[in-house]
Amino acid sequence: MLDRLSLNYQTRLCAVIGNPISHSMSPAIHNAGFAELGLDFAYFPCEVDDVKAMLDGMRAMHNFRGLSVTIPHKVAAMQYVDEVVAADRVIGSINTIVKQDGKLIGMGTDGPGALKALTDAGVELSGKVVLMLGCGGAARAIAFTLAQQSGLAELCLLDIDAQMLQGLASDLRTHTDAEICAETMNDGTLAAAMARADLIVHCTPIGMHPKEDATLVPAELFRPGQVVFDIVYNPLQTRLLAEAEARGLKTISGVEMFINQAVLQFEIFTGGPAPEEVMRRVVMERLNQ
Amino acid sequence: MLDRLSLNYQTRLCAVIGNPISHSMSPAIHNAGFAELGLDFAYFPCEVDDVKAMLDGMRAMHNFRGLSVTIPHKVAAMQYVDEVVAADRVIGSINTIVKQDGKLIGMGTDGPGALKALTDAGVELSGKVVLMLGCGGAARAIAFTLAQQSGLAELCLLDIDAQMLQGLASDLRTHTDAEICAETMNDGTLAAAMARADLIVHCTPIGMHPKEDATLVPAELFRPGQVVFDIVYNPLQTRLLAEAEARGLKTISGVEMFINQAVLQFEIFTGGPAPEEVMRRVVMERLNQ
């Protein structure tokens, strides 16, 4: 069923676009999921610069079903779809496009994927103080999801870029009811925020391969009972998470968010439950290579 | 190598567009050819109405290599490619688009496929009188190829549609050196043309499934030594060919042209020789089902 010889007019086509695209694990993850369920879908990677033309082509191909969008197209793609899900409009980026009745609907699964990673790990969010380190694209998605859906006591944002910081804080205050604090990051504001946080969500590239030695948070700032979530997934355990774990804290790797955003995409593309364990195995095999 | 799980950023994508597309044998033929040679290509069918958008998408996808174009897009596709091979411009339709250095080049393989079917069958064309029955899209492609490349004594066109007939005759006279005659088809002109023809090329839908009982040429008009080529390939042997064969004439089925146009496309897409026997086997298996 699932060899290339069987590609036929009923095969639902999916793709991931970005540039570069050679590193993307999405084709392996989704195709493994389709194979596991015996679904007649095929998912291929496309290096793309012209997002508008790509989406026009997706609209034209009647059997094209869904698209994953990765760097550098997550912001630009929004303007070429027919509709963006309300919750994602203010986030300002999308990573998923699905065709419904000929229309392209854009949405994001990074925020929901992060939330699912937290709840799957048994993290209670209601009434808690969350510290977000970094205010870039992924941070925006996660911040909005947490602010809208989790009943936080407070969401505290730190970033060294004052403009990005105040932009996100202002958008969160305008569009959610959450209690927001926002401060330019330095040693003092970081220490003060760490003293109050129940959950730390790290959304900067610090600690990512090939700079595994770096960490943003001095280990002495950790306090018992804190949970540390790092959206970096390469390496699977960053220095931040290793030091938190060494102090007995609960930690969650970015790979959980990565797997969950793919699971949610798969369910949007196919309209049914994803074979999460198979998808997880593909990711782990790739990351452990 | 060639399952869907292995679709990757280096996989060269090809497709066929048309509407309807469910009947197309092209995906099975080309994918079998890629598999035979171990080439990392994937070919999928797409029902498409908006040809311009499809071609824009093809341009945007860096790993998109080639497109087959079928009914009803063979004429419209010409205006959306970046270049049409000179020989095909005056024919007025294309069935093949290949991307070279980011540009879409349109061309036709129906004419060359027909010529190859004739030469593979050992038919000598130089100095011969060819009678073409029908002046539609496929006839135009075949007529131009024969008029330009085969040193015919005369190319005689018959059609019941005087406007199409005179249009093709005029284009052939303008753009080729061949001796052209053109007459509106009726019992008298058909009998007269059959009396002079060495090769009859049948390019109308008469005799095609589900009207296998029909034939345009009364059997008594056949003369010894004539060759009869019918571009219809479903059924493999039309009534026209059966009656010609019963009189001892050499006959060539449209399936030979169909296979050869696919072989030529494959070679355009891949830049190397096609595994013709494998492609032929796929076509024959499908048609004998």
Image (cartoon, coloured by chain):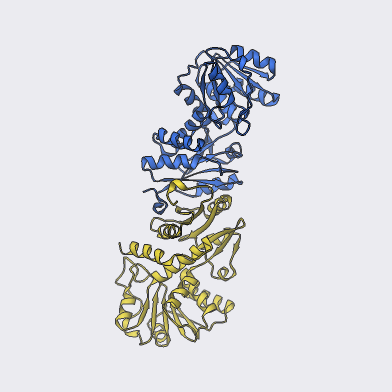
Chain colours: A blue, B yellow
Q: On screen, B196 above or below A179? A: below
| Whether residue B136 is visible | no
Splitting the image into 4 quarters, where does residue A222 fall? top right
Q: Pinpoint residue B150: horizontal percent, then vertical percent.
A: 51, 80
Q: Position of B106 compared to B248: left or right?
A: right
Q: Pinpoint residue A36: horizontal percent, then vertical percent.
A: 38, 40
Q: Residue at x 67, y 15 (%)?
A: A189
- Asked whether A52 or A261 is in front, the reply is A261
Q: Pinpoint residue B18: horizontal percent, then vertical percent.
A: 46, 57
- Asked whether B7 or A68 is in front, the reply is B7
Q: On screen, A65 above or below B44? A: above
Q: On screen, A270 above or below A254? A: below
Q: Number of marks in the image?
A: 0
Q: Residue at x 46, y 22 (%)?
A: A121
- Asked whether A142 or A228 is in front, the reply is A228
Q: Position of B24 compared to A141: left or right?
A: left
Q: Residue at x 43, y 60 (%)?
A: B36
Q: On screen, B283 above or below A148? A: below
Q: Residue at x 69, y 24 (%)?
A: A160
| Whether residue B147 is visible | yes
